[in-house]
Image (cartoon, rainbow, N blue to C red):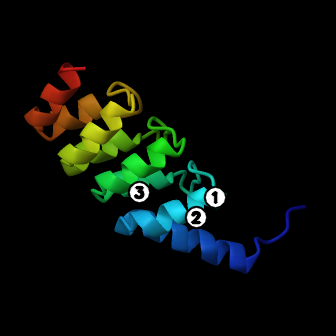
Amino acid sequence: MSEAPDPEVVELATKIFDLARQGRTEELVAYVDAGVPADLTNDRGDSLVMLAAYHGHAEAVRALLTRGADADRVNDRGQTPLAGAAFKGETEVTKALLEAGADPAAGTPSAVDTARMFARTDLLELFGAR
């Protein structure tokens, strides 16, 4: 039998996920530096990196990656942060993830497949340069 989550913990987690979505890097990394896991995920398996990447926040992505977040962590749908960045056409986020060793072929669909689907030739060139 599982207990209901503590409402204060849920509220804090929601705040931290919102910080990632909003790219509020200083506040976000203050929580991570204080002990929040860099790979914290929400109820859909989206990591802090995934949320920051999808919303175009390269600085937050870099900060999380330097604190140990997994650049290739897939969510519950099999998507990676790099595929999310490719979907949104986020070049700077893509560069940050590639610099951290993200695999363009990981996930379903992969970042390469996503870039092809949306004719993001600039990103395909970045993937080929790896």
In contact (CB < 8 Å): disc 1 and disc 2? yes
Q: Is residue 20 left or right of residue 1?
A: left
Q: Nearer the viewer, mark 3 or mark 2?
A: 2
Q: Give the mark, 3 or 1, whose residue is nearer the N terminus.
A: 1
Quadrant in the picture for the C terminus: top left
- Residue that carries the numbered disc 3 in the rendered image: 51
Q: Quadrant of residue 113?
A: top left
Please state which amino acid type lies under the numbered disc 3. Leu
Q: Position of residue 86 (x, y in %)?
A: 24, 42
Q: Give the mark, 1 or 2, whose residue is nearer the N terminus.
A: 2
Q: Residue at x 19, y 20 (%)?
A: 128
Please state which amino acid type lies under the numbered disc 1. Val
10 Å crowding of disc 2: few (<14), some (14-19), many (20+):
some
Foreground residue among 51 and 45: 51
Q: Quadrant of residue 51?
A: bottom left
* Disc 1 element: loop
Q: Nearer the viewer, mark 3 or mark 1?
A: 1
Numbered tag placed on residue 36 in the rendering: 1
Residue 98: tell me if it is visible.
yes
Foreground residue among 62 and 130: 62
